[in-house]
Image (spheres, grey):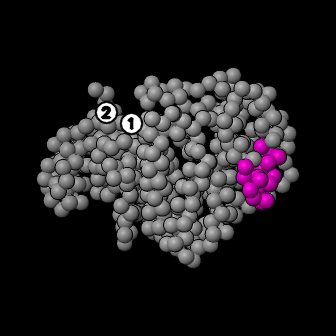
Amino acid sequence: MSADHVLPAGVLEEVAGLLSTHFDRAVIVVAQEYVKSGRTSVFRLTLGGAPVETAICRYGGREETLWNELAGMRFLAQLPRPPATVPTFYAGGPVGTDKAVVLSRDIGTSPDLAEILLRGTAEQARAGLEGWVDALLEVHLATFGHRAAHDAVRAEYDPPRSFTELLSDGGFARLAEAFAKLGIGPLPAGFAEAVAWVDAQLAPDDRWWAFTVADCCPDNNQVGPDGRVTLFDLEFAGCRHALLDLSYVRTFMPTCWCLRRLPDELSSQLVARYRDRLLAARPELDEDEFEAGFAASQAFWAITTAGFQLERTLTDPKAGERLYFEGVDFAVAAPAEVVRLRIAHLTRLAAERKELAPLGELADLIAGQLEKRWPAIDLLPLYPAFDAPQV
């Protein structure tokens, strides 16, 4: 077995010590089971002496993403009413010479939303998506107004969080750089003003900022037998505008490998489900503010992801090819498909909000270049759960 797939004996001893302190009793690690690896390696630990039989251990380098996870889970656990849609935090911190761990409740092996969207029925996928939106809302409602508390916990760990909430610092800069390199032409008049409007909507505001999962992709959760969704993977989590999470259902999973489209009617129903429950729980919020913040959140993700892929799409001869993963029987969207999808969304936003009207001209410029380079590239299909014939 690979060394990355086994926790060293010394680390296991430190983990047992952390769990013993948390549970206020002597705990030992009886066995370890490797689950998967990404930025961290995930293990299921069988425990002795603890009030629970198993725990999940995330193990990795002392880097920003692991500190985000640790700080986020610590912060949520300290709330007066911790959201039940995130695994219970046990303990965590540095171990060994250069590693760290996050220890939490084992949420089992039920399927994640990605599995359901790829292989389930439309009914199962709809129920899973509703549970997913409800889970995001539960985290947001529990954390509105607690930004200072989160930031105080996060400040205990280095390096600091580098996520930016400003479009002008990230996606806009990449898009402008790609335009300059590719010689497409100057950005449309008024585009900078549209970006400034987006930034203004997403700027720090305790009324709308909450703890957000950020990378809330379909595979970063589990759907229980009762349909309740538990969110995990907080490696990019932090406090920012809550609607940046919700826009995943309209800007179609902007940071996710598992990318296809949802039926328009369903995405609108999911947005309404979140909006109506949010405004009922927090009547001091305004529906017009919601609509402005939601439009800005969609523009943020559409421009950021299009800017990230644009240069490759127009210069790489393989940018129209999907990458097939046998393990999940799924072909990841080609960069050209991603940009086509994002540009179509910018066109839609430009028609819906006058503040974002300059995005329409931008979309036309990029669409013209895409048509020259990839004339056969169309919008992505629906997720298989909604695209397959229903028996």
For the N terminus, the quadrant is top left
* Magenta-span inclusion, residue 333: no
Tell me the kind of residue under disc 1.
Answer: Ser
SS class, disc 2: helix
Say which mark, if any, is on residue 37.
1
In the rendered image, residue 328, in percent from the top left (x then y), is placed at 43, 30
Q: In terms of secondary structure, what is the magenta stretch mainly? A: helix
* Residue 176, picture quadrant: top right
Q: Which mark is residue 5?
A: 2
Task: Answer above or below: position of 320 versus 187.
Answer: above
The residue sitting at 69% across, 60% down in the picture is 199
In this view, the residue in front, 311 or 363, is 363
Up the image or down, 259 lies above or below 301; here it is above
Q: Which residue extends farthest top?
A: 317
Q: Quadrant of residue 96?
A: top left
- State the image coordinates of residue 344 (x, y, percent, origin top left): 71, 43
Considering the numbered disc 1 on the image, is that residue within a helix, a strand or a loop? strand
Q: Amino acid at mark 2?
A: His
Residue under the image location 62 percent in, 72 percent down: 286
Q: Is residue 226 visible?
A: yes
Position of 387 with respect to 174 (left or right) is left
Q: Residues within 10 Å of mark 2 (few under 14, many from 20)?
A: some
Q: Residue furthest bottom?
A: 284
Residue span colored magenta: 348-363
Residue 211 appears in the figure? no
Disc nearer the start of the sequence (2/1)? 2
